[in-house]
Structure formats: structure tokens, C-alpha cells
Amino acid sequence: MVAAVAALFLLTACGSDDETSAPESTTRPAGSVASSVVQRAVDAAKLGTFVATFRTGYPNLADGRDDASIEAIVTETCPLIDDGASDEEINSRVAELSTNGAVTPTDQQVDRITQLVRAAC
């Protein structure tokens, strides 16, 4: 985790074209930049943990999928959770996003994956 935070900090410390080309008066204060870097590191760590847990716990649902498609289970479900969607709606979305071709998760798997998603949000 520390290595992931350090790597992310190094990547973000270099800045993007947007940050380096912005006039100095529109740049963010150092505290908000550090906070943003920490938040991105936490988000990346949560997504990484989710992907690793999903691959280990559900190899048939993860087989042949890239990390981005597994991360989408979290990134596309968290807004539903944040908007107060019902458990039924959330579970339905998790089931849909977890399906891997003809391999669909069981109801019990959906419940466990949903718990992991909630932790990653």
C-alpha cells in the first residue's frame, strides 16, 4: 500500500499538461493538491484491492477480463449507492457487471461482491 501511494504520488507530482499549463493564479493551494493526491491514492488502492480480491475469490467471473472491466463493477455501482438506490437495484447492477460471458454469479456471490463494492466506495 505504501508503495502504491508513493508511486501514485510520484506520478501526480510530475503534473499533467493541464496543471503545468494553467496560470499560476488558478493553481490549487498545496494543501488541496496533497489532499487530492492522497484521495486518488486511496481510491487506486481500494480499486486494486477490489480487483485482487475479485480475481482470487471469483476466478470464473474474472477469467479473461482486464482490470478495467473488473474496476467498472465498483466505478459503475458506487454512484448508485451514493444516490441511495435500493439494495435490489444495486445487486442487479453488480450481477450484470460481474457476469463474464455465459458465467453469471450466484445470488450468494452477488451479495458478497456487493459487500466488497460498498467497501471500495
Image (cartoon, rainbow, N blue to C red):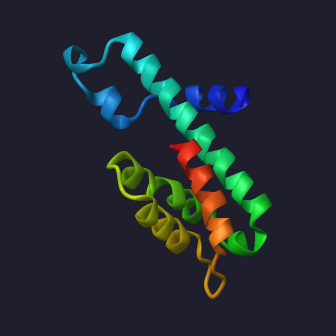
Position of residue 105 relative to residue 43, above or below, is below
The quarter of the rendered structure image containing the N terminus is top right
**Quadrant of residue 71 in the image?**
bottom right
Q: Residue furthest bottom?
A: 102
Judged left or right of residue 33, residue 18 is left
**Quadrant of residue 88 in the image?**
bottom left
Position of residue 116 relative to residue 108, above or below, is above
Position of residue 14 relative to residue 92, above or below, is above
Residue 16, image x, y percentages: 40, 34
Residue 16 vs residue 55, the one in the foreground: 55
Please give the name of the residue rendered at 67% of the width and 67% of the height, measured from the top-left corner.
108
Residue 85, image x, y percentages: 36, 56
Please give the name of the residue rendered at 53% of the width and 61% of the height, measured from the top-left corner.
73
Judged left or right of residue 32, residue 98 is right
Position of residue 62 relative to residue 51, above or below, is below
Please give the name of the residue rendered at 50% of the width and 33% of the height, measured from the top-left corner.
40
Judged left or right of residue 85, residue 54 is right
Residue 90, image x, y percentages: 45, 61
Residue 49, image x, y percentages: 68, 45
